[in-house]
Amino acid sequence: MNCAGIAPNGRILSKRGVHDLELFHTVLKVNLLGTFNVMRLAAERIATSEADEHGQRGVVVNTASVAAFEGQIGQIAYTASKAGVAGMTITAARDLAQFGIRVCTIAPGLVGTPMLAGLPEEVQASLATSVTFPQRLADPAEYARLVSMIAEHDYLNGETIRMDGALRMSAR
């Protein structure tokens, strides 16, 4: 399971000026390059393990975000990085198939993680109302349960699975 994410805000151009290129680079480095690096190193280790009777050795589960598909204003770096993670999924699955390694990605919506926990409670409650159903933040244990389900379901491969309560992000 591969989970990395920082999400500083910044518009391409705002009243304060142009988006800081170093900030954009940092977000890509953590979210996209970090995910790739862990995936490649994990794949190297998994490839040396004993295959099961179907030739399977393991699965890598990466973390994208619903922002990969509908990023909000000020999320250009985060959106680009998470879209990159989602975009790597099918190619990684194809690259690693010869070693019996599956690759899937989860694109969570609003999850009660430390990233959201820093927001005031009223802001978190307001965010929860934007979720279609169930109208609440997801619990990190639900994310973990989905990782387990992917690991157990040996025909899931090359998929990006949204875990978002039918949330579709607005522009703001």
Image: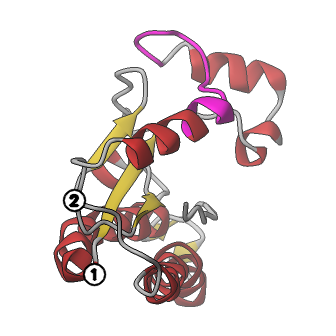
> Is residue 167 depicted above or below 149 in this figure?
above
Coordinates of residue 29 in the picture (x, y in percent): 54, 85
Identify the mark at residue 158; answer none if there is no mark. Answer: 2
Q: Could you tell whether 59 is left or right of 125 in the image? A: left
Q: Position of residue 165 (x, y in %)?
A: 42, 21
Within 10 Å of disc 2 (Cα), the crowding (few <14, some 14-19, many 20+) is many
Between 150 and 132, the residue placed more toward the observer is 150
Q: Secondary structure at mark 1?
A: helix
* Residue 151 disc label: none
Residue at the disc numbered 1 = 99
| Neighbour tally class for label 1: few under 14, some 14-19, many 20 plus, Cα within 10 Å | some
| Mark earlier in primary sequence (1, 2) | 1
User: Which amino acid is tagged 2?
Assistant: Gly
On screen, residue 160 above or below 36 = above
**At which x and y percent is residue 77?**
46, 70
Instruction: Check disc 2 and report its element: helix, strand or loop.
Output: loop
Against 131, is 164 above or below?
below
Q: Main secondary structure of the magenta part?
A: loop
Toward which corner of the image does residue 99 lie, by quadrant? bottom left
Q: Residue at x 45, y 87 (%)?
A: 48
Discs 1/2, front: 1
CA–CA distance in space, label 1 to label 2: 14 Å
Task: Report the magenta residues as a range.
Answer: 131-143
**Camera sees residue 58:** yes
At x 43%, y 49%, the residue is 151
> From this viewpoint, is residue 72 visible?
no
Tally of numbered discs: 2
